[in-house]
Image (cartoon, rainbow, N blue to C red):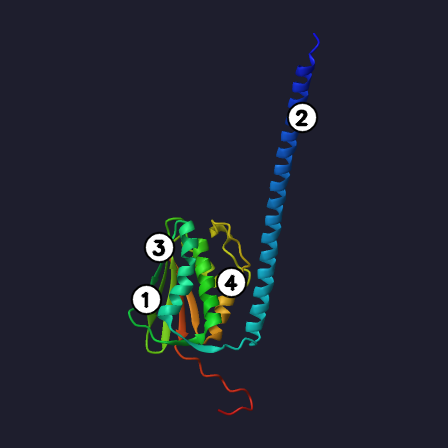
Amino acid sequence: MNLDRRQLQAAATTDSETDNETESVTAALQAERSARYLQILQTECDRELSLVNDLLELQRLEAGAVQPVWASLDLREWLPEIVLAYRERAESRQQTLHLELPETLPTLVTDEQIFSSVLRELLTNACKYTPPAGAITVSVTPDDVTLQLSVNNTGTAIPPEELPRLFEKFYRLVSRDQWRQGGTGLGLSLVKQQVERLGGTVSMTSDDTATVFQLGLPLEPPVAEPKPGEFL
């Protein structure tokens, strides 16, 4: 039976619409694939750039080429700005973030940029390894000559044999990075070098209740050792 002209036109129109829809879906899939590949490339480029920058900074610290710029910090104003900037990240992962400060705090004379870098790295680290419903707590305890600052996060304990290695270059606890955040493996090496450059100390403990990074920073800049041939 022959189809009349209207039926043929309708069939042709349907075929054309189907072809257009197929082309649109194919184009959308290709665009989505391209966007995903570009995102992967961007992530990898960012990671490589971060690695290069961390390596350069670590080399400068190890060579003694980083000279602190000492300045007075009002910790009651300065610390909340740094710590609470991580609240949105923590909440997006169902984590809670607390800052515990005493009623009075002494003025800290330190290098603001270096101290900020140390604190941001420890907070990033805490967010990375804290599970959902976990807690991150930053607390400060001053005495007459030092500032004791701790970054505490709940989660799985780190095996004792791994604790000494965490400050080594490129050492990472990949199995505990449940957020797949990644990193260069240089963050804690930088923290150690930076804290020592400020005349302080950094240590860590870990058990079934929490992992704690403890910083000890002098309230005043350390007295520089005289170079050979120099006199105080």
**From the viewer's perspective, is the residue at label 2 or at label 1 nearer?**
2
On the image, numbered disc 4 is attached to which residue? Answer: 187
Tag shown at residue 209: 3
Picture residue at 48% right of the left edge, 66% below the top = 117
Tag shown at residue 101: 1
Is 18 situated above or below 181?
Answer: above
Q: Residues within 10 Å of mark 3 (few under 14, many from 20)?
A: few
On the image, numbered disc 2 is attached to which residue? Answer: 16
**From the viewer's perspective, is the residue at label 4 or at label 1 nearer?**
1
Label 4 vs label 1: CA separation? 26 Å
Amino acid bearing label 2: Ser
Is tag 3's residue or tag 1's residue first in the polypeptide sequence?
A: 1
Amino acid bearing label 1: Leu
Image coords of residue 39 (percent x, y): 59, 49
Image coords of residue 190 (percent x, y): 51, 67
Q: Residues within 10 Å of mark 4 (few under 14, many from 20)?
A: many
